[in-house]
Image: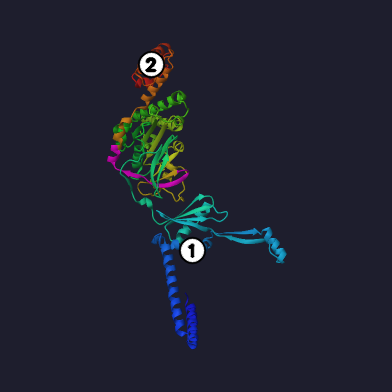
Amino acid sequence: MGARRIVVITGFVGFAWLIAALTGFGNVLVWSVCAVAVLGAAILAAMRFRRHRRFSMFGSELYYASSIVLQRDKWADLMEILDLCVDADLRRTRSARARGVMTGVAWNDRRSVRYIPTVVGVSKAPYGLVVTVDGAPGQSRDGWKRHCGQLSSALRVREVAVAEPIPGTFELQLRVRDPLDTPHALSSVPRSCGWELPLGIDEQGHSIAESCRNLSGVVVGGSPGSGTSNWLTVALASLAQRDDVQWLLVDGKQGYELEGLARRAYRYIGGDAAGDLETVRDALQDVQTLMHERLRKARELYGHANLWSAGPSRRHPVVVVVIDECQWYLDTRSFTSNESKAVGAEIDAIVRDLVRRGRSAGILVILSTQRPTAHSIPTSTRDNCALRVCFSVRTRESAVAVLGEFSTDSAVSPIGAPADVGVSSLEGFEVRFRSPLVSDDAVLEHIRSTAGLTADPLDLLGSASMDLAVRADPTGVYQPYGSAEFGRKAEAGAQEREDRNYSNRPAGKPSEGVHPSCVRRLGK
């Protein structure tokens, strides 16, 4: 209240008291004025307390911002100052023009209108405040994003991000803290729901996961110490309890980063063995053989051209091929001799083939690197990998090597992110998340309890192929799968057909009944 207004009110009250005193009602007036003053002061204090409580309910860091967004006039002034209003020159309605003619008022056919975005909701979030705004006609998310810097300065918050959950309705995320700064520790390994790989918690504090169903490749990258190995360990361990998934683990560090998962893998290549390129190539060739056989006999094996359509099973499991520090096998610059370059080229060709054609055969390749570049993960291979997870990196080039197209202007960026904080794509939108931390003992106990589910997928394929061969026996005698008689007939029939094929086929031609690699592995 200004000084002039106080003087005027005081003078008016004094004059009224003087008149009342001259007429004999001075005491009554004085007490009435005092009562009204006390009541008015109480009402004013209650209103101020309510407003203060309303503004402070979001915390001291957001007191100023909430005082703007919760008051219509101040919000409208801010929108005009930041040029977020839309001015339009509209044509008057027919009824308005008719009223002008009837009243004799010469109205212009057009009128100026100013549309001001209005606040329709305010809610608290782990990172600060969410302000829901009905945008003015013609406004877009990109237009609001261009004003994020001005909004953060005007509202005195650290950062403002914009989302558009509904066309025409915008969410202003006023960020004053990072909810991902706190480690997300779990006492046990999270269990995968369906074929989802747990990412961790997002900025809303919700658990999020990404599906690997019907995918052929996953790319994981980040600087050393950023959390790539930790997330990869937890993500794989979450699938360990499934009997329809098998792993091949290749530890390119030639160390034992993934050793905790070794008991659940049908083959683990670590230590010095991981430095032997021929060993790695042979292991990948076995998976390639499995892929070729599944593609060739898909309808006979599981009744569909795509394994995911039939559903993975214990006999036809999803095969997850994990190559940690893949740059040691895919980057030609890491090879010194012509022999190693030749073997490296074979490994690269096999990986490309698995990523390109392995989806319908139930092959999932996970490429992980702590040196993400276009050489460590070839662009063509990365583009065929639908799921990409990027932890902290230092440069835009490293982020692009993992995520593909990436803009440094994005509010969701892995550049300089804290440890265990990553970026991935969820339902077409990039999201930040913090991966869970699970103790080594908890992971080992979980893997130990599921180690009995491990089986070599080539052995399983050989068994399934022999089943097909026995079912096609010309004698027409059929026994249910799994019976003792079925097993004896399977062995006898397979041996008889193998002998017949070897005696009848040209030299060097493989058996038509069972793939040679499957026969070899089964000891036939």
Q: Pick the residue in front: 347 or 246.
A: 246
When the figure is inspected, residue 504 is found, relative to residue 463, above or below; the finding is above
Q: Pick the residue in front: 165 or 350.
A: 165
Q: Position of residue 503 (x, y in %)?
A: 40, 11
Local secondary structure at mark 2 = helix
What residue did someone put label 2 on? 494
Local packing at callout 1 (Cα closer than 10 Å; few below 14, some 14-19, many 20+) is: few
Q: Is residue 212 visible?
A: yes
Residue that appears at 41% across and 33% down: 364
Whether 441 is among the magenta residues is yes
Q: Position of residue 328 (x, y in %)?
A: 36, 36
When the figure is inspected, residue 206 is found, relative to residue 287, above or below; the finding is below
Nearest to viewer (mark 2 / mark 1) = 1
First in sequence: mark 2 or mark 1? 1
Q: Which residues are magenta?
A: 426-445
Whether 290 is among the magenta residues is no
What residue did someone put label 1 on? 71
Local secondary structure at mark 1 = loop
- The colour mode here is rainbow
